[in-house]
Image (tube, grey):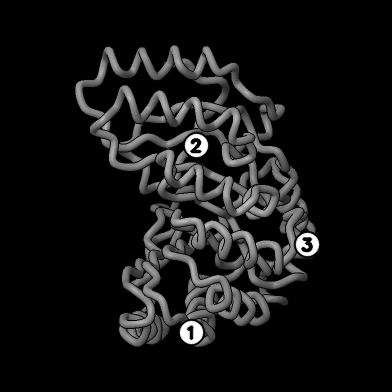
Amino acid sequence: MRYEGNIFRPPSEAYSLLVQVTVGCTHNKCTFCSMYKDKKFHIRKLEEVIEDLEWARRHYPRVERIFLCDGDALALSNNRLLPILKHIRENFPECQRVTVYGRATDALHKTDEELRELFEAGITMVYIGAESGSEKVLKDINKGETRQQLIDGVRKVEASGMKASVTFISGLAGKEGWREHAVETGKMISEMSPSYVALLTLMVDPSVPIAEEIRSGRLQLLSPEEVTAETLLMLENTEVTKECVFRSNHASNYLSLKGNLPEDKEAMMSLLREALSNHDMFKDERFRAL
C-alpha cells in the first residue's frame, strides 16, 4: 500500500484496510486540528487507488472492512467514487462495510439520489466532525460549516440509508463558553438524530492556532471535573427518539462512557454524577492521548 503523509482513521476502523483515495482535507482550517497541515488537498488517480486495492487483494486473504482515506473522501464526485466501490464489491466479496470521513457540506452538495447511489454501491457509514452545536463555537474554531448545515447534512446522510457517526469535542469552548457548548450540542444531537455519537476531549497540538489562544489566556482549558459537568449538561439536553449509539471512550477522555440513547441515558448520567464526587474515577493526565 502507498500512503502520502500521515494517515488518520476513526478508532472504530482499527482493523480496517486503509485506502487513500484523496489526500488531505478540503477545508483544513479548523483551529484545533493538526491532522492534515502537512498536506495540500488533492485527489489520487483512479489507477493508483485500483493498484493499491489489487495489492491488498494479493496480500490479505480476508478483508471485512475498508476505510477510504483521507479526511474528506465524500467530497469526491460519484463519478470518481463509484468505480472504486465497484472494484471493491467485485474483488472483496467478503467486505462487510466501506466507510469514509466527510463534511456535512459534502452531503449537502450531493443529491438524494447520489447519496442513495453511494449507499447501494457499498458505503455504509460516514464519519462527520460536528465538534459543537454552538454557532459561536463553530465560528471561533473556523469550522466552515454552520449549525444548520451540520444538522441538515447528517439528516441527509441518514435518509440515504447510510449511517452517520458524528464527533463532538468536550472542552472546546473553554471555561467561558462550556455551558452554551453543552446545551447546544445536546440540542444538535436531538435535532440531527445520528446513528452514532462520539465524544472526544480537547487535546491540543502546540502548532495549531487554538494553542496560541490557550497560551495567551483567551481560552482556558477545563479541568476533568468541568469536562464531566459539561458532558452531564449535554446529556441532560439530549432527547432522541431513534436509537443512537453513544461513546465517550476515546483515549483523550477522562471518563469512559458507553451506552445507547435514550435507554442508557440515565445510567450514563449517574456515572457522571458519581465521578463528580469521586475524582479517583478520572483517567490520569499521563494516560490521555490523541
Dot 1 crowding, Cα within 10 Å, few <14, some 14–19, many 20+: some
**SS for tag 2?**
loop
Query: Looking at the image, which residue sits at the far front?
Result: 113
Looking at marks 1 and 3 on the same chain, the residue that comes earlier in the sequence is marked by 3
Q: Is residue 129 above or below residue 53?
A: below
Q: CA distance from mark 1 to mark 3?
A: 26 Å
Q: Is residue 139 above or below residue 31?
A: below
Residue 257, position as x, y percentages in the image = 35, 70
At a point 30% along the width and 18% down the height, the residue shown is 57
Looking at marks 2 and 3 on the same chain, the residue that comes earlier in the sequence is marked by 2
Q: Is residue 104 left or right of residue 116?
A: right
At a point 59% along the width and 70% down the height, the residue shown is 222
Q: CA distance from mark 2 to mark 3?
A: 24 Å
- Name the mark on residue 239: 1
* Of residues 222 and 107, the one drawn nearer to the viewer in this rendering: 107
Dot 3 crowding, Cα within 10 Å, few <14, some 14–19, many 20+: some
- Name the mark on residue 8: 2
**Tag 1: amino acid:** Glu
Residue 140, position as x, y percentages in the image = 78, 62
**SS for tag 1?**
loop
Asked if marks 1 and 2 touch (Cβ < 8 Å), the reply is: no
Which residue is tagged 3? 140
**Tag 2: amino acid:** Phe
Asked if marks 2 and 3 touch (Cβ < 8 Å), the reply is: no
